[in-house]
Image (tube, grey):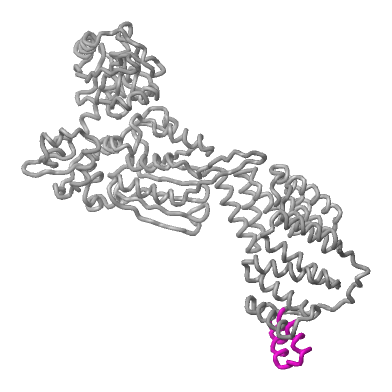
Amino acid sequence: MIDYIELRSFLQQGEDVYKEFKPKITGHTEEIGRAICAFANDFNWIGGGFLFVGVNNDGLPCNTVENYDEFQRRIADICRDSISPPLTPVIKRHSIDEKPVYEIKIVRSMDRPHRYKGACYIRVTSTTRRATLDEENQIRDSCLIPSFDHQPVEKSSPSDLDFKKFRDFLRDTRPQEIFDIDDDLINIAKNLDFASAYGDRILLKTGTILLFGSNPNKFFPHSKIQAIKFNGLSLSSPIASKQIIEGTLPELIIRTRQFIESYVATAGVFLPDQYDRIDYNEYPYWAIREAIANAVVHREYQQYGREIDIRIFDDRIEIISPGTLGGGLTVEDLGTGKRYIRNHLIADALRELKFIEKAGTGIYRLREEMIRNGSPEPVFKVDSNTFTVILPAHPYYSSQRFLEEANQEKGRANYSAARELYQESLNKNPKNYYALVGLGDMERDLGNQEIARELYKKAIDLDPSNPQAWLSYCILEEKRGNIEWARNMYREASKKVPKNSVISRSWAILEWRNRQYKEADRLFEQAIRGDPSDPITWYKRGQMNINSKIERIKRQGEEQLKKALSLAQNEYVESDIYFLLARAMPSLKYSAEEVKDAYEKSLSLNPYRGATHYFYGLFLKNIGENEKAEDHLNKAKRFGFIPRKRHKPLSSTNRKHN
């Protein structure tokens, strides 16, 4: 019987293969009789079904006027006089919103097939229909030939049962009274058909060992799952992780789910020009659970030598189980309510433990969960001896994984492979902003300027508030010598992404390179107001100013570099700052020891920089430390530093400076 607390939500789920609603018995006798007959025949092997009287089509109580005693009598008459062989359903009265609701529970009958007024009926989705001759024969055969998991295991004994697991199962699924009647677990196992007596021996059923055995692999070494995570899209891709999962069937489901979910990502995405975050799962967790449980329940355990295979690729999960669909089902039948249960004992137990859906709606809901998550629909494949469920990754994630691989290939200078991966990323998600920019940057660096420009434009149109495409576009035009165009782009970017310090800093560097020092300094100041803790802005501003021939500005540059040094967390940046300070110190009247200390600090942070060794060597020569100077000059050569030809410096009158 259904608990009262669960009844309201149970009814609100609507009619399905497992339950039917009628407002009253009067005027609906034929429909009620056929439904009771169909539930007892249990063609779908779901354990039977429920018929509720006093409920409308929406699952709401409708205040039936049926007298409960009279109602029970009329149902008993239908089951005795019109159904053959006769049935004895369990009837219970509920009250919802002070309105009576009558529950009729019909369990799978051991005397099936049953007929109502001479005709055999079955339940298909939420309807009751007359069975074909072939379907009636299937019902009859299911009573005569036990499924493989119902067959006793010849060499088993009660010692092969994990008593704790079996007791926990009973406590979760059976009333406490079962232990009051007989607390001997083996007797309970026999009474519930989990074990059989053969003379003086007790043999456990196949399903019992798989579900609650102390060591299922002792009898069924193929009852395990091989799970592999690949870094790529095919079986030839590198293996990131591999695990052989063993144990009872509930343990297989739980541990496999944990393995897969350890690789499943969840992220919050803010859509362009929107403040609402959308959370995407790479794969919906419920769909993963259902696909694993489905494989465990429906695989052919008599196929020795083959386990269930789980394969996690960058863009999909494949779950491959031994055995075809069976029962004449096709892929097109999946999710329609048609079912074939290969392992009845296992299915019933896992349904009671709520590992699988109780009404044959698992595949239907799996599809719904994938769609609700924004993922492509699952794919089902059947061949001569396997059934495969493929869960495609959410486009956002599969696109991101291709993007990551593309960036890696670009870093290796494998541009052809990178281009293909960027394109695959965009095929999965044409709105992948970072794939557009990444591909654009690569095409720009390869000299394909027009292609890069179009990609940047697409990215900007997609998300004008993201600075990355603007910055890349500006760099492109600057490299092409279109300085005024680049300025206009920076100006437009500042309007679309106001107060962005990186845009201001990059624009400042452009003006610095073009000797517009006053404008550059203004833009550096703007960048610092946007992010006063950014060491790079302080570093670049200081680098510009410390090279000035005006002492006041040179001193400002020194202070700005020291500020950058206090904020920097990168050893190479710190090394560069000490190098710049060391070169400027002589003109700022620092002592030789202070200059040497700055050079030494720079080299302690980056001992392989040839330029630092070279200029340190020149400085040491100037102060008469020739032997040490030669050592540093030789190191500069060893590290590949070639000094550029010195040009006559611009006079201060020719430089636009503040």
Q: Does the magenta stretch include residue 628?
A: yes
Residue nearest the viewer, comparing 123 with 530:
530
Q: Does the magenta stretch include residue 360?
A: no
Report whether residue 69 is seen. yes
The image position of residue 45, as x and y in percent, is: 29, 29
The image position of residue 21, as x and y in percent, is: 35, 17
Count of numbered circles on the image? 0
The image quadrant where one finds the C terminus is bottom right
Magenta segment boundaries in residue numbering: 612-639
Q: Relative to 243, say whether 345 is above or below.
A: above
The image quadrant where one finds the N terminus is top left
Residue drawn at x 77%, y 49% as measured from the top left: 494
- Quadrant in the rendering for residue 339: top left
- Quadrant in the rendering for residue 97: top left
Q: In this view, does 494 lie to the left or right of 170?
A: right
Q: In this view, does 339 lie to the left or right of 283?
A: left
The image position of residue 504, as x and y in percent, is: 76, 55
Residue drawn at x 73%, y 47% as measured from the top left: 497
Q: Relative to 445, say whether 148 is above or below.
A: above
Residue at the limit of the structure toward the left, as seen here: 200
Residue nearest the viewer, comparing 169 with 573:
573
Residue drawn at x 41%, y 41% as measured from the top left: 383
- Quadrant in the rendering for residue 51: top left
Q: Is residue 35 left or right of residue 159?
A: right
Q: Relative to 166, say whether 604 is above or below.
A: below
Report whether residue 475 is seen. no
The image position of residue 317, as x and y in percent, is: 46, 46
Residue drawn at x 58%, y 56% as measured from the top left: 405
